[in-house]
Image (cartoon, coloured by chain):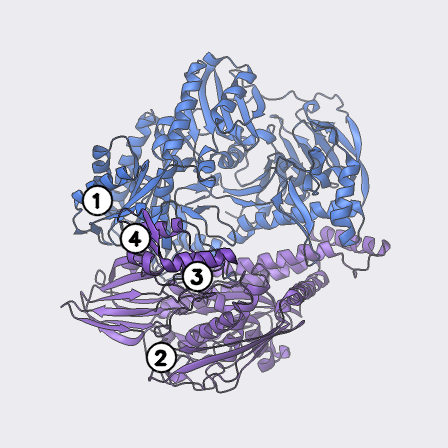
Chain colours: A purple, B blue
């Protein structure tokens, strides 16, 4: 049957030639069909891993990515759970190619890599793996993936922490080693992993989950080569990259041209010193350049980013203005360039700690976003909660005495945009198809009770379009000696408003002791001890507003008050809408009347 | 005695009936929104079936899904645990549209001011932390009366493990406000995940008044017409229930039509000795496929309405037959995208204007148009005269020119891309879940199933296609063959190997008590009820589960005996096993079936040496680029035992079956068309 199939396609190719079709030997539709099948394989490999993972950070948070690259390491298709992993698979594969040389790669090999300072690096917790795919003895592609493991050793449970000062405290580092050689697991390496993690079963399960999903990719690519012929498959890969590039270049041509700048300050370096992120974005007919020169040097706390993750940070905004529905591949990114300075917080060097690399990485995204928002109002709204607001919590479960580990992001408010209020209780831009852990699962699995999970209706972010509310989450320790670590960035500088909209609010958390005393508010802590009955109240910010609040329709303001997103007082002070206790409209403030009048004359 | 099934679709309401002699009657009539019951009563009247002979009436309806997608349900409120009223709005915090930074997440069906809280709390082990403050519930009722609410949903944290507070709150609401519609989540599902459960009970309450009034009107209409037989409605789990019970939990009726087609495929398979089946239903706008493994359809509770790749949609955590649906049907529009690639779907020309062929002003070429140009379809069965030149011009302009190919090649390519999309969907339900398609046969139904399935099965490597006798109204046929079915799923996490059988049997017996009660309410006697038990299991630490069949009465060693089955199933689905890692049970799933006696199907006349001649010949363009003169048979002419070699076409009024070169057609005793695809059959290794 296979032979018959291929025979038909060859006949097709002949038909193409006879009609003088300028397309090479194989007709375009066959290439497209093959290309779609390739993308379908990418999806399969992505989903297969989530379903077998042992770590909630992978199966609920989908803090991982997987992709397929061509024989040179160019990304063909990528499945992302976390938006911030965009395009990280191909630099990882290219790093392995230059490190080992393809002549030293064999069918069945699997490499492991998590070095933050080289290709595809983020932080040590994200374990990258890649496998060369051979058709017979010919290298035709690579499959790769990258996933956040719950624990890979280091100074703190969950490995990533907020008080490390050098990378050696953050866990095991693999700078591109052969984990599986010709199909056989390297027992020495597996042994090192096993002896150096606090949760060896989960690490073992995730390691095999990652390997299995790579092998699925390898098998599926071979099936495609069987079905369509290996030349067709390779040509379809090329077509995919060329089409991506073509679409990107066409869009780029239609963009406004110029240079946009923005500078933001991260809260601090953990020792009270300000950290700035600065960007100059230049768009020309055929280039998109983000230049971060002038950003702060690398710092002592673990908020430093390597250059691969910085590039990913820019890719997010680049995709959003280009066309969010485009398939992600390296062709699309060909016109994009990122410039940064070695030794800076955005291109850090060994041994700078990178546990919380996402703080500076997402600030880089936010700064590019901020710079371009006025020029791309249909694609970019006001500032959002920004930080992952990561929580790492460990201890003993009160019901079964087992050790538990929470590693999770916290949702918050997004900014409003032209024509739309901001979204409520969403994870930050660096996450994506990321799921919160349900209260009922969290209470079952972890030694905590959740007293509240609700919206933070502080009413900040007023505007013609209102910023979305953040969230409030209360975790109560159910046993003594639990350790709480959190990194809530954007705790000093609020989510920015846009086009006359007000700023949103801040992320923070407070600790309430069982005896009634309160500690905080905090932005960042490491391993605070919680005893039975103590609780942490985590509050994430409301996003920035868009447009003048005095222009928001009265009916929308009434609905906001009725639903408790804003108070009666805020209706008056921020929106100039005076209501009685039954929420009937009484009158508009003088400022509102004036703003409306000005609007009408415009 | 006659039994009748009716299935409401977007355009047509289908009827399939079996009279006392086993004779099959099929009929289509127009759907009549907004009073859908009229279309049902019309089609019964048009069938000419004597009302007093109808002993059983089965029904599939789109009323519920329409009420949800059109947002035409009731003004609904939510009563929940203090601290958690925003769960419904926060949802799961996910953003499937990764790079769209101005995305909009799903808006809750209950606005914030109608989400009220009461003081109560149950812990994760089921113990009561804070007693329910009953006065809080009464205050909610007062507030909601003032707001003019029509329906109420109740969902408390951890009620999956202990529903005492929820059921008490339900009683209080019912007593204080007897006229209001109200559901507690425990009545709908006992699975964990509070957002999904809240969403499910909210959607149930949202559609309850509409479902109730619809079923009342239909019931009254049937009675007025003198139909007093037993009346059932089809549920998404592939079984039916009485009108009475359907009113309580109408959310179970969501996918009643599509699942009946899958169920029909399973039953047809049973009749002809095939237990591994892929059901392929190709309609006007979508293709729906589903896999039946050893006679069992897969059931999922991860269903979401309105979910797309870029939109999270709304979860409905009730058992639904697992169907993968893609936007590729006869009316799917073909276009060349910005990068110069040919695409088919997901946009559809719908019923109006429809494909260019309908002559209703459609200008976008569709799959149906491409089938006409390549000779697969004949224009003579359309209601209108088909203008082939108009179709060719549309394909020429929209597809052929931009791609620089001939019109015929473009038409062929539209079919190839559409079929490739469908094959990718078919792989999703088969190869990617560890099934070998060579062990499966494809049952092709819907208007377009017979047209494409020979090619799909060949590309998927399935060895045989069955085109049932009533392919175009197959969902209604499936309903006719249904059993009564209810599912109880209970989340209760415990280690597989070490949990005492007594603890496990306590859960089974609690579920069986509930099941017995429900089945008796269905009017069934004990000897008519069958049980199936399934446990959803996982490796400790994992999240997603794998279902394994078991028994509902465990011995001391039953758990141990399941360990190996679990490892095997895990390896089957996910390619690896973790020997030595502890296994735990997450859900107990009891399926109760009320077996209804099945009608005997009439057989068609057997070929006795006479020749069956084609009614004509059409030129058909095949995938190899060659036009072949292809004989056309008329399906009503065919007799049991007839066989012929492809290429050939079988026309009937509502569908055309394509048999490709190198394939074989046979007709079985029930009039099913059987196509051998040329792929060698693999026997299952088990």
Residue B195, placed above or below residue B11:
below
Q: Secondary structure at mark 1?
A: helix
Report, in whole angstroms, how far the alpha carbon at label 3 lies from the one at label 2: 49 Å
Cα–Cα span, label 2 and label 1: 45 Å
- Most extreme residue toward the left is A515
Is residue A478 visible from the viewing direction of this image?
yes
Q: Earlier in the sequence, mark 3 or mark 2?
A: 2
Left or right? Give the position of B340 relative to B582: right
> Image quadrant of residue B505?
top left
Residue, disc 1? B165
Which mark is nearer the camera, 3 or 2?
3
* Closer mark to the observer between disc 1 and disc 3: 3
Picture coordinates of residue B643 (x, y %)? 71, 30
Residue where numbered disc 4 is placed: B493
Rendered position, B154 above or below A323: above
Please, which chain is the residue tagged with disc 4 on? B
Numbered disc 3: secondary structure: loop
Cα gap from disc 4 to disc 1, whole angstroms? 21 Å
On the picture, is B533 further left or further right than A314?
left
- The secondary element bearing badge 2 is classed as loop
Residue located 82% across and 53% down the image: A15
Q: Are marks 3 and 2 on the same chain?
A: yes
Q: Nearer the viewer, residue B248 or B474?
A: B248
Let me know if marks 2 and 1 both belong to one chain. no
Instruction: Report how far apart the C-alphas of labels 4 and 3 lie in the structure.
Output: 52 Å
Q: Is residue B302 left or right of residue B356?
A: left
The label on residue A154 is: 2
Callout 4 touching callout 1 (CB < 8 Å): no
Tag on residue A548? Answer: 3
Kindly indicate whether the residues beneath marks 4 and 3 are on one polypeptide chain. Answer: no
Label 1 crowding class (10 Å Cα cut-off): few <14, some 14-19, many 20+?
A: many
């Amino acid at each position: 049957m296979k032979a018959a199939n291929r025979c038909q396609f060859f006949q097709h190719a002949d038909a193409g030639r006879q009609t003088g079709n300028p397309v090479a030997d194989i007709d375009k539709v066959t290439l497209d069909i093959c290309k779609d099948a390739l993308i379908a394989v990418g999806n399969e490999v992505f989903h297969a891993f989530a379903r077998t993972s042992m770590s909630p950070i992978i199966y609920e948070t989908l803090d991982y990515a997987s992709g397929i690259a061509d024989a040179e390491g160019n990304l063909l298709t990528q499945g992302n759970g976390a938006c911030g992993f965009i395009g990280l698979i191909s630099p990882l594969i290219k790093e392995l190619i230059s490190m080992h040389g393809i002549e030293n790669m064999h069918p069945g090999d699997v490499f492991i890599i998590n070095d933050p300072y080289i290709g595809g690096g983020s932080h040590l917790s994200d374990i990258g793996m890649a496998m060369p795919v051979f058709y017979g003895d010919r290298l035709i592609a690579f499959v790769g993936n990258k996933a956040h493991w719950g624990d890979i050793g280091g100074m703190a449970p969950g490995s990533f922490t907020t008080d490390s000062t050098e990378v050696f405290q953050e866990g095991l580092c693999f700078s591109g080693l052969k984990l599986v050689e010709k199909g056989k697991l390297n027992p020495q390496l597996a042994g090192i992993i096993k002896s150096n993690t606090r949760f060896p079963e989960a690490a073992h399960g995730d390691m095999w989950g990652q390997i299995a999903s790579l092998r699925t990719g390898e098998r599926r690519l071979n099936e495609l080569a069987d079905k369509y012929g290996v030349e067709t498959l390779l040509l379809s890969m090329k077509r995919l990259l060329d089409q991506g590039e073509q679409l990107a270049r066409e869009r780029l041509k239609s963009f406004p041209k110029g240079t946009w700048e923005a500078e933001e300050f991260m809260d601090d370096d953990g020792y009270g010193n300000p950290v700035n992120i600065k960007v100059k974005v230049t768009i020309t007919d055929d280039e998109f350049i983000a230049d971060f020169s002038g950003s702060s040097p690398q710092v002592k706390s673990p908020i430093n980013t390597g250059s691969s993750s910085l590039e990913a940070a820019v890719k997010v905004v680049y995709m959003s203005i280009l066309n969010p529905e485009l398939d992600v591949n390296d062709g699309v990114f060909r016109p994009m360039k990122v410039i940064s300075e070695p030794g800076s917080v955005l291109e850090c060097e060994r041994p700078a700690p990178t546990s919380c690399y996402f703080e500076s990485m997402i600030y880089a995204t936010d700064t590019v976003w901020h710079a371009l928002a006025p020029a791309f109002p249909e694609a970019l709204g006001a500032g959002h909660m920004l930080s992952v607001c990561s929580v790492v919590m460990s201890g003993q479960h009160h019901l079964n005495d087992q050790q538990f580990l929470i590693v999770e992001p916290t949702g918050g408010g997004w900014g409003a945009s032209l024509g739309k209020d901001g979204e409520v209780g969403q994870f930050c831009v660096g996450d994506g198809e990321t799921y919160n852990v349900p209260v009922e699962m969290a209470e079952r699995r972890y030694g905590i009770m959740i007293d509240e999970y609700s919206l933070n209706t502080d009413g900040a972010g007023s505007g013609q379009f209102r910023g979305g509310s953040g969230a409030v989450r209360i975790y109560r320790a159910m046993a003594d000696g639990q350790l709480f670590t959190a990194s809530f960035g954007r705790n000093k500088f609020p989510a920015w408003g846009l086009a006359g909209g007000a700023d949103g609010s801040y992320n923070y958390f407070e600790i309430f002791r069982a005896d009634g005393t309160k500690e905080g508010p905090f932005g960042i802590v490491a391993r605070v001890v919680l005893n039975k009955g103590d609780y942490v109240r985590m509050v994430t910010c409301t996003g920035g507003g868009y447009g003048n609040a005095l222009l928001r329709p009265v009916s929308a303001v009434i609905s906001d008050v009725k639903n408790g997103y804003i108070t009666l007082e805020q209706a008056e002070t921020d929106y100039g809408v005076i209501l009685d206790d039954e929420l009937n409209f009484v009158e508009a403030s003088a400022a509102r009347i004036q703003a409306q009048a000005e609007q009408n004359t415009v | 005695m006659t039994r009748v099934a009716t299935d409401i679709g977007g355009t047509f309401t289908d009827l399939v009936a079996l009279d006392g002699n086993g004779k099959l009657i099929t009929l289509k009539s127009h759907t009549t929104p907004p009073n859908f019951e009229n279309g049902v009563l019309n089609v019964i009247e048009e069938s000419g079936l004597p009302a007093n002979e109808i002993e059983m009436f089965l029904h599939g309806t789109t009323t519920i899904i329409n009420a949800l997608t059109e947002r035409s349900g009731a003004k609904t409120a939510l009563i929940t645990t203090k601290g958690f009223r925003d769960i419904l709005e926060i949802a799961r915090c996910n953003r499937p549209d990764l790079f769209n930074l101005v995305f909009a997440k799903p808006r809750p069906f209950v606005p914030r001011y109608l989400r009220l809280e009461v003081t109560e709390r149950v812990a994760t082990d089921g113990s009561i932390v804070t007693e329910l403050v009953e006065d809080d519930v009464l205050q909610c009722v007062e507030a909601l009366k003032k707001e003019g609410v029509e329906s109420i949903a109740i969902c408390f944290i951890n009620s999956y493990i202990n529903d005492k507070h929820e059921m008490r709150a339900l009683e209080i609401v019912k007593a204080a406000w007897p006229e209001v519609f109200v559901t507690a989540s425990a009545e709908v599902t006992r699975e964990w995940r509070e957002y999904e459960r809240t969403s499910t009970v909210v959607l149930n309450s949202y559609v309850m008044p509409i479902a109730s009034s619809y079923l009342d009107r239909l019931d009254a209409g049937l009675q007025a017409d003198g139909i007093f037989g037993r009346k059932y409605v089809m549920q998404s789990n592939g079984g039916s229930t009485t009108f009475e019970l359907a009113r309580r939990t109408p959310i179970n009726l969501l996918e009643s039509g599509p699942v009946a087609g899958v169920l029909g495929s399973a039953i047809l398979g049973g009749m002809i000795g095939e237990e591994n089946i892929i059901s392929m239903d190709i309609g006007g706008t979508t293709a729906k496929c589903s896999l039946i493994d050893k006679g069992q359809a897969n059931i999922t509770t991860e269903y979401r309405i309105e979910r797309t790749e870029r939109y999270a949609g709304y979860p409905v955590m009730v058992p639904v037959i697992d169907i993968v649906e893609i936007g590729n049907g006869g009316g799917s529009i073909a276009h060349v995208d910005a990068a110069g690639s040919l695409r088919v779907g997901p946009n559809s020309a719908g019923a109006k204007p429809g494909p260019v062929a309908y002559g209703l002003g459609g200008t976008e070429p569709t799959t149906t148009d491409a089938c006409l140009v390549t000779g697969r379809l004949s224009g003579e069965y359309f209601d209108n005269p088909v203008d082939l030149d108009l179709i060719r011009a549309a394909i020429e302009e929209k597809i052929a020119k931009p791609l620089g190919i001939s019109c015929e090649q473009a038409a062929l390519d539209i079919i190839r891309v559409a079929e490739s999309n469908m094959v990718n969907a078919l792989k999703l339900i088969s190869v990617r879940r560890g099934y070998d398609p060579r062990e499966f046969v494809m049952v092709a139904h819907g208007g377009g199933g017979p047209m494409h399935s020979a090619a799909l099965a060949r590309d998927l490597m399935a060895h045989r296609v069955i085109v049932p006798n009533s392919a175009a109204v197959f969902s209604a046929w499936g309903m006719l063959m249904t059993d009564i079915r209810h599912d109880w799923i209970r989340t209760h996490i415990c280690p597989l190997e070490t949990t005492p059988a007594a603890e496990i049997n306590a859960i089974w017996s609690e579920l069986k008590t509930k099941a017995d009660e429900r089945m008796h309410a269905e009017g069934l006697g004990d000897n008519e009820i069958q049980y199936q038990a399934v446990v959803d299991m996982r490796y400790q630490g994992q999240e997603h589960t794998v279902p394994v069949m078991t028994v509902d009465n465990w011995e001391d060693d039953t758990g141990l005996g399941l360990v190996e089955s679990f490892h095997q199933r895990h390896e089957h689905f996910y390619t690896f096993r973790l020997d030595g890692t502890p296994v735990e049970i997450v859900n107990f799933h009891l399926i109760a079936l009320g077996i209804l006696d099945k009608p005997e199907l009439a057989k068609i006349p057997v070929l006795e040496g006479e020749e069956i001649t084609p009614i004509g010949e059409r030129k058909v363009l095949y995938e190899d680029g060659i036009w072949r003169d292809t004989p056309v048979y008329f399906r009503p002419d065919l007799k049991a035992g007839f066989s012929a070699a492809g290429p050939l076409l079988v026309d009937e009024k509502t569908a055309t079956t394509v048999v490709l070169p190198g394939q074989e057609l046979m007709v079985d005793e029930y009039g099913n068309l059987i196509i051998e695809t040329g792929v060698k059959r693999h026997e299952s290794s088990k």
